[in-house]
Every structure is written in structure tokens, then in C-alpha cells.
Image: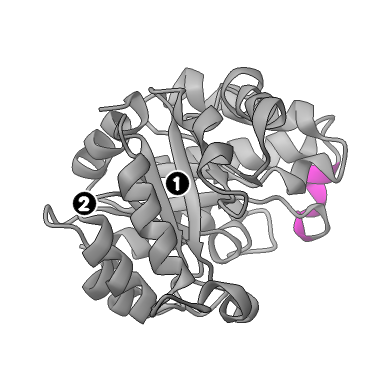
Amino acid sequence: MSHFIELLKTRWETSKSMLCVGLDPDTERFPEFILEHECPIFTFNQAIIDATQQYVCAFKPQIAHYSALGAEDELEMTIDYIKEYYPEIPVILDAKRGDIGSTAEKYAMEAFERYGADAVTVNPYLGADSLEPFIKHEDCGVIVLCHTSNPGAKDVQQLDVHGKPLYEHIAQLCVGLNKHNNLALVVGATQIDALRNVRSIANDMPILVPGIGAQGGDLAAVLEAGRAGDGYGLIINASRSILYASKGNDFAKKAGEEAKALQMAMG
């Protein structure tokens, strides 16, 4: 079992939570006093992490929210902070990488060596050989897009392929590739039928579920369709509903309250 999966399983049990907080900073929504700091993104993230850490099974920074602003250093600082103060909480780098050969290997190095993430999201569109450079990092998690939460997902992911939708083939492919027990899948909270189908294919493989909160996913339906046999098995992500629960100086306190409410709702 990979270190990522061990961390995740232990964290599910100790926190009694399947909540993942997405660290997707939008500086336009920060309280004004945060913008006065030398590293405003890290300062904001640090406050959110401290306020929510007891209620989460993972944190998930989305790389575009940093690289678009040239703030990769603050992403590194954020992950380093989690690793130093909350090493029991796994960090998922949401990068959705997908390429072949040496390029995929560089993307794996970026996620696992440069940033020190415990897991990374990847795109399987290029096939199994594009996933192998990530999978060979046996202690790290590889979280594969299967059926995403956006409305346009059906344009490709539900295409009929030999009598089954494409996303089911992706789930089956990942079951076959999971030789190091370090794979997980992404299924959006707005895709309950797909979530139920994927759970039946993937057995107890972890499923990252974005789309709760601002995107309108139904938490009760997600829990009913997606729980694994041990009662856990899900990494249920919420970002904006937690990060921006308040626009005032009490933003961290309100974020903690929102995270706690979600954790309790998952019980």
C-alpha cells in the first residue's frame, strides 16, 4: 500500500471526516488586510489551513490558481507549511497533468519532488503509458479523471464505447493498472449515477469528489452512492464555500465553521 493511501486511510479514521479543502486562492476575494502582507496567498492559506485542519482528510491546492499569478513560491510555502505542522494530512496537487514519455516523467517530478505533494490529479486521455510515469512513484497517489462535474463532461466522458460509457472504461483501466495500490479516481458530485457505477467497478479505491458546495452537488446523494465498504472511501472536496464563507476579518473562523458543518454532515 502506498504512503498516500496509508495517510488517507489513517486520516479518515482519526478525523472522522472525508472532507478535502481545496486551496484555490482568488486574491480578488481576499479580505483587504490580507493583501497588505508580503505573501498574501500564503498568509490566506495558512489561516484557512489552521482553521480547518481538524475537520479534513486532505488539502488540495489547484496549481493554476498559483501559476497564473506567478505565485508558485507561495504554493511551495503552503505545502511546506502543511508538511511541517500537519504531516498527517495528505496534500493533493490538483494539476490534471497528462502527457507521454519523458514529459510525463517531468510532470511527476514537478508534483512529487518539486512541490512535495502526496498525490496528483492526472488526465488519462493519452492512455495507460501516459499514467505509468506517475504510477511508478509507488508511495505517491495518482488520481485519475474519470467523470468530472462540469456540464460538458458528457460530451466525451459518456460516449458509448462497445456498449459502455467511456468513463467506465477509464475506471476499469485504472483497476488493472493499480499494481502498487496508489491509484484513485475523480468523479464529480453532480454525477451520482456515474459515482455509483464507478464505485461498483473500483471496489474500495478512493474517489475524489469535487462539486460539493458552490457547484451544487448533493452531499447526501454522494455519500449514499460513493461510500466504500468501510464507510469511507471518498475525498469530498469543497473550495469556495469554505474559503469565502466570509469576506471580513473573520474569514478563517467562518471557514472553520463551514468545514465543521460539512464534516458533521458526513457522519
Residue labelled with disc 2: 204
Mark 1 lies on a secondary structure that is helix
Secondary structure under tag 2 reads loop
Q: What predominant SS class does the magenta segment belong to? A: helix
Identity of the residue drawn at 22% across and 66% down: 200
What is the C-alpha distance between the residues marked 2 and 1?
26 Å
Q: Quadrant of the N terminus?
A: top left
Magenta stretch, residue numbers:
29-35
Q: Amino acid at mark 1?
A: Thr
Within 10 Å of disc 1 (Cα), the crowding (few <14, some 14-19, many 20+) is many
Q: Nearer the viewer, residue 223 or 191?
A: 191
Q: Is residue 31 located in the magenta-colored stretch of the structure?
A: yes
Identify the residue position indicated by label 1 in the image: 52
Where does the image place residue 8, in percent across and percent down from the top left?
A: 31, 37
**Residue 191 at x, y percent in the picture:** 43, 78
Q: Is residue 241 above or below residue 41?
A: below
Residue 169 on image: x %, y %: 41, 63
